[in-house]
Image (cartoon, helix red, strand yellow):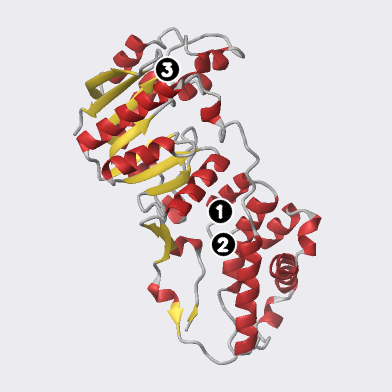
Amino acid sequence: MTLKDASAYNIQFVNGKPILIDTLSFALYEEGAPWVAYRQFCQHFLAPLALMSWVDLRLGRLSSLYMDGVPLDLASRLLPFATRLDFGLLTHLHLHAQAQRATASVKEGQSATRPRARMSKLGLIGLMESLESTVRRLQAPIRKSGWVDYYQHTNYTDATFESKKRLVQEAVQRLSPRILWDLGANTGIFSRVAAQANGALVISADFDAEAVEVNYQQAKQEGNPHLLPLVIDLTNPSPAIGWDNAEREAFYQRAPADMVLALALVHHLAIGNNVPLTRLAETFARLGKFLLVEFVPKEDSQVQKLLRSRDDIFPEYHLEGFKAAFAPYFYLEQEMPIEGSARTLILYRNRQT
């Protein structure tokens, strides 16, 4: 058999593993027939992986702009010259892009009369092996951004960190969520605490592609079936895409989760990105039934770093102002100071549930 479709959208993560879900993509192999999904595979898998490996992990987000895969001519122009010295990338990407341009330049009437290309079974197997070896050589570059090493530069003591872990664990165990979203998860430390506490499916989301890659590689190494790391920028979350903006749901449309974690996140959104506390509360109220949020006050060194390069135009950013902003949307269930710090964990229950 062969696959007649090679769309990345046919891959879903089940128990932490990527699974091909489109059974209608399977077709009986015909002797001499080429692989009809070759172009699609190169655009949906090879091109974005090559760009992420050779240029920047953030280029993976191009896939959300191009539902039919990253155009090969675009990928070819963005990739460095050194990729032409890799036989697989030269053949399947650069020369493939040239062939696409040449085909596009042929007049419509002429292209209709061209005979269908033939490929022997041995040639088809060789094509598959070449693609596989090319993809396997691509490695994710981790350049140690400030976010990957975030926990090495916080003001947490060991006791503070353990106190926060314990409080998160106890809250998750008590509420037993089936689906939990950890927003601003970084490399997933507290996502793992939540997953281990209850065995829930944890969507571990962060805007930093390198932090998410580190998170995913660790989850893969652990064989963790409860963790799904995703690149999500909360100031510009994944939108609904496709025809009529209805083929693929926006990230927030997939809510509500049973529980949402927002740990060491609010100050980045409220002060770093000028999002009013009332708007934060309104958005969080759409995302989950329970919310465990960490409030980091202005005297905290991490907030002071944000305020060094800007005026303090946030007079309502204090614990009481925060609770006042969230009160119309949530019931305050529990307020938990984090040992050894001025930070507070607050457990909220959505008023709409």
In the drawing, does residue 64 fall left or right of residue 169? Answer: right
Amino acid on which the number 1 mark rests in the picture: Ser
User: Which callout, 1 or 3, points at the residue further toward the start of the chain?
Assistant: 1
| Image-quadrant location for residue 113 | bottom right
Q: Nearer the viewer, mark 1 or mark 3?
A: 3
Residue 291 coordinates in the image, percent (x, y): 29, 30
Residue 304 coordinates in the image, percent (x, y): 54, 12
Residue at mark 3:
296
User: Which callout, 2 or 1, points at the residue further toward the start of the chain?
Assistant: 2
Residue 306 coordinates in the image, percent (x, y): 55, 17
Local crowd size for mark 3, using a 10 Å CA cut-off: few (<14), some (14–19), many (≥20): many
Secondary element type, mark 3? loop
Residue at mark 1:
63
Amino acid on which the number 2 mark rests in the picture: His
Q: Residue furthest bottom?
A: 31
Cβ atoms under marks 2 and 1 closer than 8 Å: yes
Q: Nearer the viewer, mark 3 or mark 2?
A: 3
